[in-house]
Image (cartoon, rainbow, N blue to C red):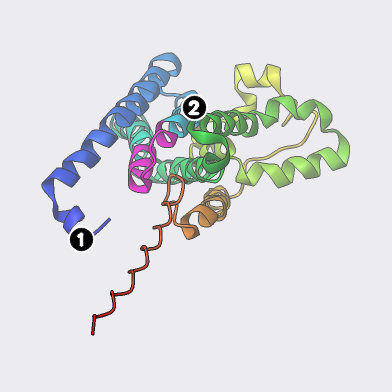
């Protein structure tokens, strides 16, 4: 984006238009989570799930890099606004809100990076679909993988995977709301914290760091190839100019 584009009111207005619909969907999704879960840990976990579902398709539909990044950020902002309201209506603190936003923003960056990496090969729809399925599978590993975890080896695997997991990182931020694995529904779906020892990560920054690194690694090839953030196809090469015919000889 050139300097003139950044100061052009029309370009700025276009960014607002690009952000409006993703922001609205992120806000509505998080608000529905608030209505369903109330001021509990489920509200924040639902926000991460909404970002996982909404961000890839909303970002992948844009070819221009800045538009894709704007759409992705707008989804996160919509969720963050609902979380901010909890600072004034519950026991959540501003520091918890800020850390939670960093966790979900890093997770959103990793999802965007996956879309960027897959879009040239799979197209917008394929890249978005794979990113959503992969993201949900990663979020849900405490459910589908836990039956295979057992003994000391299973505890080690859980110890490796837990620190980078966005939901466990969110749980670390809002540890005052209780362990995720001890919530009524999760207690029936996973054996983490029961048959398999599992503890919350010591800090949230492991998840933030891992997801930011993943985002950079996935997005770098497309950006270096000149495709931009959205991973669109490179510009077609300019055909060489036709050779100029030699001048006719001057008659004697």
Taking the magenta stretch, the answer to whether it contains residue 20 is: no
The residue furthest left is 9
- Where, quadrant-wise, is the N terminus in this rendering? bottom left
- Where, quadrant-wise, is the C terminus in this rendering? bottom left
Counting residues from the start of the chain, the first of labels 2 and 1 encountered is 1
Question: For the point 45% across and 18% down, which residue is it?
Answer: 37
Of 86 and 167, nearer the camera is: 167
Report helix, strand or loop for mark 2.
helix
Asked if residue 152 can be seen in this view, the reply is yes
Residue 246 spot, x, y in % from top left: 33, 74
Q: Which residues are magenta?
A: 58-72
- Say left or right for 216 vs 228: right
Instruction: Please say if 235 is above or below 158.
Output: below
Taking the magenta stretch, the answer to whether it contains residue 68 is: yes
Count of numbered marks: 2
Q: Main secondary structure of the magenta part?
A: helix
Residue 40 spot, x, y in % from top left: 46, 24
Of 203 and 1, nearer the camera is: 1
Quadrant assignment, res 79: top left
Q: CA distance from mark 2 to mark 1?
A: 34 Å
The residue furthest top is 36
Instruction: Please say if 122 is above or below 252.
Output: above
Quadrant assignment, res 194: top right
Instruction: Please say if 215 is above or below 170.
Output: below
The residue identified by callout 2 is 53
Report helix, strand or loop for mark 1.
helix
Question: For the point 51% across and 51% down, which residue is it?
Answer: 219
Disc assigned to residue 3: 1
């Amino acid at each position: 984006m050139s300097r003139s584009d950044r100061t052009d009111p029309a370009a700025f207005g276009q960014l607002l238009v690009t952000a409006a619909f993703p922001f609205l969907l992120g806000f509505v999704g998080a608000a529905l989570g608030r209505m369903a879960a109330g001021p509990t840990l489920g509200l924040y976990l639902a926000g991460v799930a909404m970002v996982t579902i909404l961000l890839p398709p909303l970002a992948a539909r844009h070819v221009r890099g800045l538009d894709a990044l704007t759409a992705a950020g707008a989804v996160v902002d919509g969720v963050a606004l609902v979380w901010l309201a909890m600072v004034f209506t519950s026991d959540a603190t501003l520091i918890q809100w800020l850390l939670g936003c960093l966790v979900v923003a890093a997770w959103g960056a990793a999802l965007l990076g996956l879309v960027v990496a897959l879009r040239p090969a799979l197209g917008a729809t394929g890249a978005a679909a794979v990113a959503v399925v992969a993201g949900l599978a990663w979020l849900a590993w405490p459910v589908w993988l836990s039956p295979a975890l057992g003994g000391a080896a299973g505890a080690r695997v859980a110890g490796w995977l837990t620190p980078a997991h966005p939901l466990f990182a969110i749980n670390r931020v809002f540890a005052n709301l209780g362990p995720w694995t001890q919530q009524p529904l999760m207690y029936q779906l996973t054996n983490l914290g029961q048959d398999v020892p599992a503890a919350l990560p010591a800090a949230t920054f492991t998840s933030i760091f891992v997801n930011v690194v993943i985002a950079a690694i996935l997005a770098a090839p497309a950006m270096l190839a000149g495709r931009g953030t959205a991973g669109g196809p490179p510009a077609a090469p300019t055909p060489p100019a036709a050779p100029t015919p030699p001048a006719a000889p001057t008659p004697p």
